[in-house]
Image (tube, coloured by chain):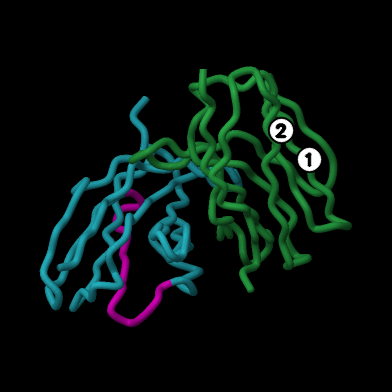
Amino acid sequence: GAGVSQSPSNKVTEKGKDVELRCDPISGHTALYWYRQSLGQGLEFLIYFQGNSAPDKSGLPSDRFSAERTGGSVSTLTIQRTQQEDSAVYLCASSLLGDREQYFGPGTRLTVT
Amino acid sequence: QKEVEQDPGPLSVPEGAIVSLNCTYSNSAFQYFMWYRQYSRKGPELLMYTYSSGNKEDGRFTAQVDKSSKYISLFIRDSQPSDSATYLCAMDAGGTSYGKLTFGQGTILTVHP
């Protein structure tokens, strides 16, 4: 079956612009996660959704970052007023309720110039 | 100091060698321990998952967890060139931290023919 998909695969944006990153989880997966992977920091947790609610937003690095999930499916991660330090690969994962196996998408490579 | 420490390598071994990958951690609340494999420009994929201390074997892969020492290992027997990838350890404390994986930096492994 289809895995987790993310779009765009690559995004180049100018400093100060807003960007939206999209994640389509595996059908039926109620849990959805966003992570960020950068050279200096490795893979970091950003936010977790159970259904449409986000019980854990503790990893969002600043108030410029927000995420939403609608219909218990697609999620969008929005970064406002992008900074160069936001350059990273943004990974989305999904899992079944109660299952600890997280299935990752291929990521969106964000470059802020 | 990071919660999870992992030697980034790189590690280069000949085909057929036994590979040992390790992580140490400081948070005694971690209960679930995973190893992910990540190929270049791809998302991580789950290799092994263990709960609490002990060993788990799956084909050529063996995961060990020693909670008393806060130390986990992944052994790869009869390593193959296709095993060349970055290996990431990840940990989950469960409870209110459910699904929030904390990753090591990743070890880059190359298996040469």
Quadrant in the rendering for residue B28:
bottom right
Q: Is residue A33 left or right of residue B98?
A: left
Q: Is residue B53 above or below residue B28?
A: above
* Amino acid type at mark 2: Phe
Label 1 – label 2 distance at C-alpha: 8 Å
Pick whichever, A9 or A20, lies toward us: A9
Q: Are marks 1 and 2 on the same chain?
A: yes
Between circles 1 and 2, the one closer to the viewer is 2
Q: Is residue A6 left or right of residue A34?
A: left
| Chain seen in green | B
Label 2 sits on a secondary structure element that is: strand
| Chain seen in cyan | A
Q: Dots 1 and 2: beta carbons under 8 Å?
A: yes
Q: Which residue is mark 1?
A: B64
- Residue A100 pos. (x, y %): 60, 46
- Residue A51 pos. (x, y %): 43, 56
- Of the 4 image quadrants, the one containing the N terminus of chain B is bottom right
- Say whether residue A65 is magenta: yes
- Residue A80 pos. (x, y %): 20, 75
Query: Residue shown at 55%/37% (left/top)?
Result: B46
* Amino acid type at mark 1: Gln
Label 1 sits on a secondary structure element that is: strand
Pick whichever, A15 or B113, lies toward us: B113
Q: Residues within 10 Å of mark 2 (few under 14, many from 20)?
A: some
Q: Provide the residue span drawn in magenta.
A: A60-73
Q: Which residue is mark 2?
A: B75
Q: Residues within 10 Å of mark 1 (few under 14, many from 20)?
A: some
Chain for mark 1? Answer: B
Q: Is residue B57 left or right of residue A84?
A: right
- Residue B76 pos. (x, y %): 67, 28
